Image (tube, rainbow, N blue to C red):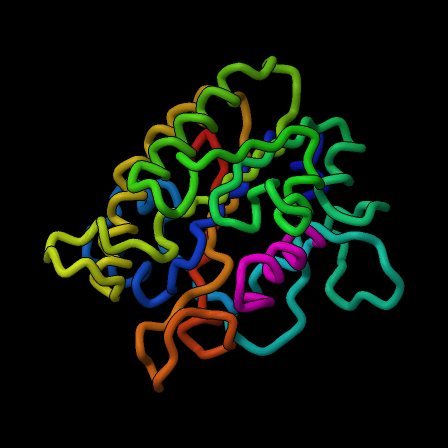
Amino acid sequence: MNDVVGHCDIVFVVLDTLRFDVADDAMRSGETPNLQRVVGAWERRLTPACFTYAAHHAFFAGFLPVPDRPGVHPRLFACAFEGSQTIDVRTRVFDAPNIVAGLAAAGYHTVCIGGVGFFNPATPLGAVLPGYFQEAHFDRCLGVTDPASAHNAFALAARILRGAPRDQRLFLYVNVAAIHQPNHFYSTDGRGIDDMASHRAALRYVDSRFPILEQAIAARDRVFGIVCSDHGTAYGEDGFFGHRAPHPVVSAVPYAEAEWPLR
């Protein structure tokens, strides 16, 4: 990351609430060709928290989802603090309270595109995470109740990328809300309920709109990308529904990194 920071734009996309098992099976079945072209395959990782607010506090402190295997896993980014065991020579360490502020101090223009309610600045709680960024966007058309939310988020991200001077490094964060409940409107069964089928259908919809973002990324000189989920969600497994409980289907998330030009 010491070779990335200062030389590449950084785009961080969180497909909010996407389960690993659904993401992995859909990709293996050829249902998400656009994401597959970019990430190749999903890595199974474990999230540091089981709902959006807590997970993003961890993410923005440099604690991204960790590989689902024992061991000490060095981090891409970190904020300096005494006693960390996951910082090594590959880690970009910031003397800052969060990596967003650290990247800003390194010359990045930091931009947040919010989706779920924890990015809605209408309340003091919802203003916390967007408040890390120099520029933050939220609108109902980006939120969970708009069936076109992914299209709208990616289109906004594309305008920001294309409008930025080529010599201005960007840190662009995009929170994609479409897979989060309610997602029943993506299903074709007409039952009007959120379930595994509608979760998967929402992912297919997000994939169909992903080229909007990718084409804008490809027009930049060099981009390092992270695409992952912040947590999964339960649809009745062991009696659990939703998230905020660390059930295995909530804790396991898809994760991938990419570099543009694509290798």
Q: Nearer the viewer, residue 37 or 110?
A: 110
Q: Is residue 90 visible?
A: no
Q: Residue 147's x, y, as percent?
A: 29, 41
Q: Is 213 placed above or below 12 here?
A: above
Queried whether the magenta region covers residue 103, the answer comes back as: no
Q: Nearer the viewer, residue 37 or 81?
A: 81
Left or right of 89: which side holds 179?
left
Left or right of 260: which side holds 127?
right
Q: Residue 155's x, y, as percent?
A: 40, 26
Q: Residue 263's x, y, as percent?
A: 43, 37
Q: Residue at x 52, y 35 (%)?
A: 138
Q: Quadrant of residue 198?
A: bottom left
Q: Is 48 placed above or below 108 here?
A: below
**What is the quadrant of the N terminus in the image?**
top right
Q: Residue at x 55, y 32 (%)?
A: 137
Q: Residue furthest left?
A: 189
Q: Residue furthest right?
A: 82
Queried whether the magenta region covers residue 59, the answer comes back as: yes
Left or right of 76: which side holds 163?
left
Q: Residue at x 62, y 28 (%)?
A: 170
Q: Is residue 147 visible?
A: yes
Q: What secondary structure prevails in the magenta region?
A: helix
Q: Residue at x 47, y 53 (%)?
A: 228
Q: Residue furthest front?
A: 123
Q: Quadrant of residue 22?
A: bottom left
- Bounds of the magenta span? 47-61
